[in-house]
Image (cartoon, rainbow, N blue to C red):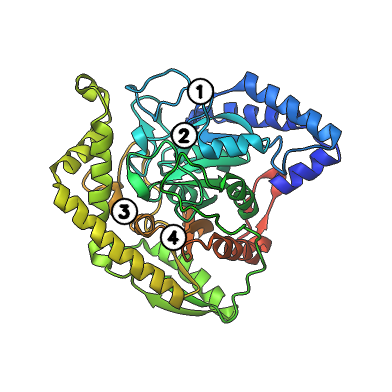
Amino acid sequence: MDVATLSAAYRKRELSPVEVVCSALERAEEISHLNAFTFLDFDRAMRTAEASERRWCKGEPRSSIDGVPTTVKDILHVEGWSVRYGSRVTDPAPFEKDAPAVERLRQAGAVFIGQTTTPEYGWKAVTDSPAFGVTRSPWNPKLTPGGSSGGAAVAAACGAGVLHVGTDGGGSVRIPASFTGIVGHKPSYGRVAFAPPSSFGTVAHIGPMARRVADATVMLQIMSGRDLRDWTQPPMPFPDLDVFEYGWKGKRIGYWRTPCVGDVDVEVLNAVDGVISDLRREGAHVEELRLPDQDDLLEIYTRHWCVGAANRLSTIDSGRISELDPGFVAAAQVGQKYSGAQRMNAEAGRSRFGSAMDALLCEYDLIVSPTVPILPFEAGRNAPDGDKRSWVEWSSFSFPINLSQQPACSLPCGFSHQGLPIGLQIIGARGDDRSVLSAAQSYEAMYRDRFVQPGGRWSVEH
């Protein structure tokens, strides 16, 4: 059930938050073999659900998500929880204060049922860590669900909670959304406060993950807002997310079909090409494009990301480096070799690219692309071919949008011949999450009649 259905059932007393939270916790236990959670907070979740039930019985809910089971990635601080960043070297002591996004969800009545897995410090686009092991896809446990918000994606796909908080520094919300067949939205930078600040700087975002666009939208609206703990936020509010009926007729859509690194799997391309054909039938004007300075983006991003990894490594006791993920250490060592001038040169390149993207999204209403150019691959690997290339090289439709900070939403758009999910990405102008989510909801409605729900499980009617 989505948020609207649950809140209506709570209001009519057809369901209790206690029943729903209990069900979500049971489901989380059922999928323990997929390793989506670092832990489940049974006692506190049930106490919070009981308090929510009392509010609904009085007709005084805090919001539409009051009593809705929610998860938080093992990156964001949660009062009373030990946040380990997927690492064995972090302090296990519980935190005393919520991160801003968590605080806003708690104030709205969300029930936090547990913490979801991440690679160490969220450094890569798959989910395995020295502290908690390998997270696996619900579609095929031999495969990765992507990352770094892989645990959140698995929980969402399996119904272990309704709302899921992820982080995205290079695609970490959108990549696992694509690999698991859910909705993942990276907001415009600054819409959701990030505190304490990420070691990876202003490429890192916090975003919602859910099974439906409407749930991601209401979740984002609640998480949005200024918090003085995040100095990088603009000192003015973002517009509300009052989603509207998005008509495709007459819209100018840029089709980003060629990634800045590597090739696109033919099955991914066929799925997205099919959507593009449907948008044209709906009256959209679609033109293929390349991003500005596309050939330079890998180096620009690598300097940002690896220097961020070096920044994080500098805070760790040198005697414990052998306990870290070797891939994380290798990325940090690359970052250590960049000079300050090289890092600032990358910042200048990022600025030029961001300005050009702002101009491009004045010319086009939206940009559409595959979310990920490849299909899910073996769990426990960093890339389909092992460690022969970095995760950045196979996530080349996502990391550029972290550099430019536009909102981007990943949605399911089909399946491979083996039944693996494929994702579509919708990108909009900075600050205009409303249009992106409106278009996403319109897109979702276009394809809704192609799905059936036998026995409570969604499947494709071929």
- Depth check, mark 4 against mark 1: the one in front is 1
Q: Quadrant of residue 267?
A: bottom left
Q: Secondary structure at mark 1?
A: loop
The alpha-carbon separation of the residues under discs 4 and 1 comes to 32 Å
Q: Position of residue 431 (x, y in %)?
A: 50, 61
Q: Amino acid at mark 4?
A: Gln
Tell me the element at label 4.
Answer: loop
What residue do we see at 45% from left, 75% from top?
362
Going by the numbered disc 2, the residue's amino acid type is Leu
**Residue carrying label 1:** 96
Q: Could you classify mark 2 by the number of other residues whose Cα lies within 10 Å: few (under 14), some (14-19), or many (20 or more)? A: many
Left or right: residue 31 compared with residue 18: left
Q: Say left or right for 56 vs 36.
A: right
Crowd rating for badge 1 (residues with CA inside 10 Å; few <14, some 14–19, many 20+): few
- Whether 313 is drawn above or below 395: the answer is above
Distance from Cα at disc 1 to Cα at disc 3: 38 Å
Q: Which residue is mark 2?
A: 76
Q: Amino acid at mark 3?
A: Trp
Residue 383 percent across, percent down from the top left: 30, 46
Q: Pick the residue in front: 125 or 185.
A: 185
Identify residue for label 3.
394
Q: Is residue 450 visible?
A: no
Q: Which mark is residue 406?
A: 4
